[in-house]
Image: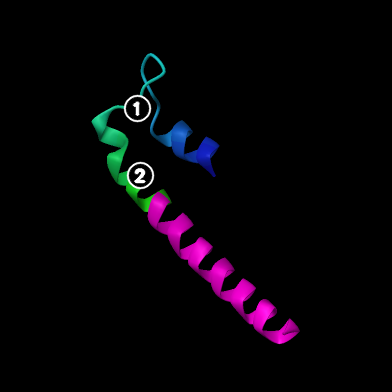
Amino acid sequence: MLQLLFSEYPSQGGTLDAGCAPGIAALMEYLRSDLTDIAHSCELIEGGTQ
């Protein structure tokens, strides 16, 4: 996924420019929701084993 992001928002000289901020914000939101789902699943698993 990061490869796709960086291919759509190419960097210059190894640094990201301000133009890619919306893409990075969208990626971070996607990852945050994914991690929230994972944390919830882990809680369910741990709750079921106790």
Q: Residue at x 40, y 51 (%)?
A: 28
Q: Secondary structure at mark 2?
A: helix
Residue kind at label 2, given as amino acid type: Gly
Residue 4 location (% of width, % of height)? 51, 39
Do the residues under discs 2 and 1 have CB atoms within 8 angstroms?
A: no
Main secondary structure type of the part rendered in magenta: helix
Residue for badge 1: 16
Q: Quadrant of residue 17?
A: top left
Q: Identify which residue, 32 or 20, lies in the foreground.
A: 32
Please provide the residue range marked out in magenta. Answer: 28-50
Q: Residue at x 45, y 39 (%)?
A: 5
Residue 39 location (% of width, % of height)? 55, 68
Q: On residue 23, which mark appears?
A: 2
Residue kind at label 1, given as amino acid type: Leu
Residue 1 location (% of width, % of height)? 54, 44
Instruction: List the single residue furthest toward the front.
Output: 50
Name the image colouring: rainbow
